[in-house]
Image (tube, rainbow, N blue to C red):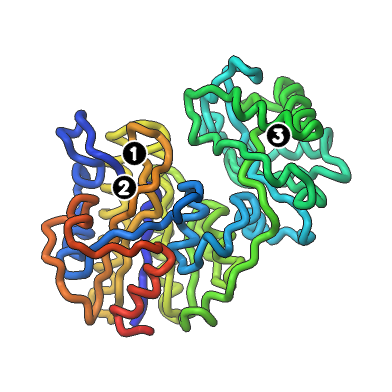
Amino acid sequence: MKVLYLIADGMGGWPLEELGGKTTMEAADTPNMDELAKDGIVGVAQTVPEGMQPGSDVANMALLGFDPARYHTGRGPIEAAAQGLELSEDDLVWRLNLVTVSQLNIDGYMRDYSSGHIDTEVSRPVVEALQEKLGNETYTFIPGIQYRHLLVQKDGAKSDDAQIAINPPHDITDKPIKLDLRAFSKSPHLWDLVFEAKEILENRDINMSMANSIWPWGQGRPLSLPNFTETFGLKGGVISAVDLIKGLGFASGMDVIEVEGATGLLDTNYQGKVDAALEFLKENDFVFVHLEGPDECGHGGNAQDKVEAINRFDAQVVAPLREALKDEDVAWIVTCDHFTPIAERTHTMDAVPFLINGSGCAPSNVPSFSEAQANQTGVKLEEGHTLLSYALDQLGLK
């Protein structure tokens, strides 16, 4: 039996007046997920442990079967794993966003956590310029994708900087940055770095984008995870546009499958991801396919875009995979990592809906796959990192 684990990042949400009291999942046209849910097990899972930040780093680590309370060290280290960086045990790895703020002082607001979803072709030279001008024995700027980059602080894990709490920029869209600036000020060297970077970003010969500040956050020691195959007995691969998911794959010894044109946005290469998943499953057991689009639309606060992202997930990922594998012995796990409600424009702690479909799964007979329907089945996993083991057990694969 082959296992397809499909993740629509941030798909869950809350009822909206503009959608007639429906959530974006309920308003979306999802006949394929609905059919899989009706014929399979449906429930909810608490992917973010109590006391941890409800982010994709924590939640996707849980979905892959690893307890974040035990293994999570920070957002930055996961993305560093995706780049195969050689790090020392005491290095501190920061996720580094290129952001747009109204002004970089205590009266400022976070205007855009992604600098208008800056293209990689634009952002990479900017980060390279930051490294050329500001990189030193302590700090190294590492270019990534779009607005997502890294800052490595040599031996920083032994310093008080490891305990500085900076808000993820997507959590404070249109909100004051005063508390975060106070946090930055606890580290004189980091404070200087942020303001020196601001001056460089003001140079239009270097930067023609909306980005006017760097935003280091999500810092931690280098990541170490158990081997996925040794843990679950499956040869697995991950498919995603974002370094976060790739990093989890690399760190756990999974295959990381690159797809040209995968953007992490509404316009991603859906067919390319489907083709890559099908090709991988010809010789292997398990594939984790991640779509970022619903989450980005949730952060943008656009209900119609998020509905469309969920529509496309069902029609352009779930549907063609079902058609291609209709005569094969396959199992399905479909879920999201966390909620990204339109009203909040950031992640929340809500337990996420999931479905498991395959031989051995008793039909739930729910009429559709949604947050409310999943909550009514009585199936709830209090520890989200047990979802994969639970699914494999139900499928007779454990």
Distance between the Cα atoms at labels 1 and 2? 7 Å
Three-letter residue code for mark 3: Val
Considering every residue shown, the one lying at the far front of the view is 51
Q: Which residue is mark 2?
A: 12
Quadrant of the rendered image containing residue 300 = top left
Are the two marked residues, 3 and 2, in contact with CB atoms closer than 8 angstroms? no
State the SS at label 1: loop
User: Does residue 261 appear in this view?
Assistant: no
Residue at 36% in and 70% down: 4
Considering every residue shown, the one lying at the far right of the view is 137
Quadrant of the rendered image containing residue 141 = top right
114 to 93, vertically: above or below: above
User: Does residue 117 appear in this view?
Assistant: yes
Three-letter residue code for mark 1: Pro
The image shows residue 174 at horizontal and vertical percentages of 48, 23
The image shows residue 304 at horizontal and vertical percentages of 28, 34
Q: Which residue is mark 1?
A: 341
Q: Residues within 10 Å of mark 1 (few under 14, many from 20)?
A: many
State the SS at label 2: loop
**Mark 1 or mark 2: whose residue is earlier in sequence:** 2
Q: Quadrant of the N terminus?
A: bottom left
The image shows residue 230 at horizontal and vertical percentages of 54, 82
Three-letter residue code for mark 2: Gly
Q: Is residue 158 left or right of residue 163?
A: right
